[in-house]
Each structure stands twice: as structure tokens, then as C-alpha cells.
Image: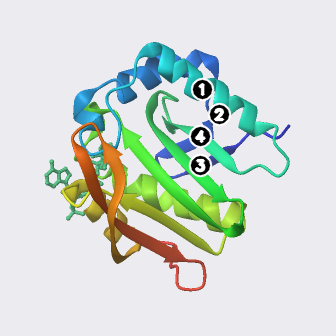
Amino acid sequence: MRQVVWNRDRLGLRDVTEADVPALHAIYGDPTVTQHMPFAPRTLGEVADLVDEAMAAVCAQPRLLYVMAVVDAERRDLIGVARLSIESEHPHSAEIGFGLHPDVWGRGVGTDLVRLLLSFGFKELGLHRIWGARSPANLPAQLAMLTAGMVEEGRIRHHVHTPHGWRDSIVHSALEDEWIDR
Ligand SMILES: CC(C)(COP(=O)(O)OP(=O)(O)OC[C@H]1O[C@@H](n2cnc3c(N)ncnc32)[C@H](O)[C@@H]1OP(=O)(O)O)[C@@H](O)C(=O)NCCC(=O)NCCS
């Protein structure tokens, strides 16, 4: 079983463990974090279940799911969570999702995290296409993905059902042969 460790500048990625549940709950359980996500704030038990699923995925062959703690490279604190899910029928392509603790928002960390995920997916996993879907209202996610080099592809109408009803998604993507490691 190979654990993920991927570092760049001030951020690192590593597989989540059971010890991360309280810190992950501080993110997934916060309504300001989930306001643009298609689910209500998670309970501690739901976060523990997500971590169990993530840890089981580490051993899968082939491995398709990476749920990773985003850590401050110096202090090793968990400041966010990143998810990369390889499409089983199109294994050259993966969807990313990410969230940071609100304490670190607005300092460029989100943009660096998207850069880190692209570098992990293209260089470490050998992917060809990486995409992410955001709420049309999620301006910080839009700017973070654009600045990191992910172009806007278009709108998927009623892509997800949220606690507030149907919601469109705006899809961003990066392709390995267009990607510039910024
Ligand atoms: C999306 C998220 C990761 C961005 O993280 P961040 O560290 O705040 O991002 P950055 O500091 O790199 O900011 C990215 C851009 O958004 C802008 N921005 C950040 N917060 C903003 C706000 N509240 N209002 C308007 N613009 C904002 C920044 O100025 C920056 O723009 P610039 O590139 O023109 O300077 C963070 O807001 C988050 O975790 N949100 C909750 C989870 C989520 O929505 N995830 C995305 C799902 S697709």
C-alpha cells in the first residue's frame, strides 16, 4: 500500500487518517464552507465514514480515489481537504474537489492548492485531463481555478441536487498537453 505524499511550495498533500476526523469536521461541518457544495454541513459521524471510505480506497487496485489532507508544509497542520476521483471508464481523466478551513481563505492558498492538485494529477498520476465543477455563484473557486490555468468549459444544467434544490455547475478543466506548471 503506497501512501500519497506530494509537496510544493507552502502546501503538502497526504492521505487522510482517522486522526484527521476532528480537523476535517471543522471544515466539512462548517456551513460557510459547504454553502456552495451540494450537501448540508457534515456531522462528525459522516466525516468519520468519509475517512473510512478514503482509507479503503488507498488499497484498491487500480486506485481511483484520493482523499487527501492539505497540510501547511512547515507546520504540518491540516488546513484543507482535496479529493481527486479518477473516472473508471475514462482513467485518463479525473475530477477534483477541494475545500479549505475559513481561517486561511483569501491569502492565495486556494489558488496554490489547485496548482498542487494539477501537478499531482499530471506528474504523479500521469493523467491527461483534470476537471472540477463549481457552483455558478462560487467566485473564489472560479478565480482560483482560472488563475491556476483551468479553463471554463461550460455549464451543466441541474447537475446536482442541493438542500436548496437543483443547481447548475460550471465545469473547468486542464489538459496535460496545454498545462503550464505555474
Ligand atoms: C474555494 C476556496 C478553496 C478558495 O480558497 P482561497 O484560499 O480563499 O483562494 P485564494 O485566496 O487563492 O483566492 C482566489 C481568488 O478569489 C478571490 N477571493 C477569495 N475570497 C473571495 C471572496 N470572499 N469574495 C470575492 N473574491 C474572493 C481572491 O481575491 C482571488 O482572486 P485573484 O486571483 O483575482 O486574486 C475557498 O473559498 C473554500 O475552501 N471554499 C469552500 C469550499 C469550496 O467552495 N470549494 C470549491 C468547490 S469547487
Mark seen at residue 51:
1
Q: Neighbour class for label 4 at 10 Å: few (<14), some, many (≥20)?
A: many
- Is 80 placed left or right of 176 in the picture? left
Q: Earlier in the sequence, mark 1 or mark 3?
A: 3
SS of the residue at dot 2?
helix
Mark seen at residue 54:
2
SS of the residue at dot 1?
helix
* Residue indicated by mark 3: 7
Q: Neighbour class for label 1 at 10 Å: few (<14), some, many (≥20)?
A: many
Under mark 2, the amino acid is Ala
Position of 164 relative to 144 (above/below): above
Q: Quadrant of the C terminus?
A: bottom left
Under mark 3, the amino acid is Asn
Q: Disc 2 to disc 4, how far (Cα)? A: 6 Å
In front: 134, or 106?
A: 134
- For marks 2 and 3, give the one nearer the viewer: 2
Q: Residue at x 30, y 42 (%)?
A: 162
* Residue indicated by mark 4: 67
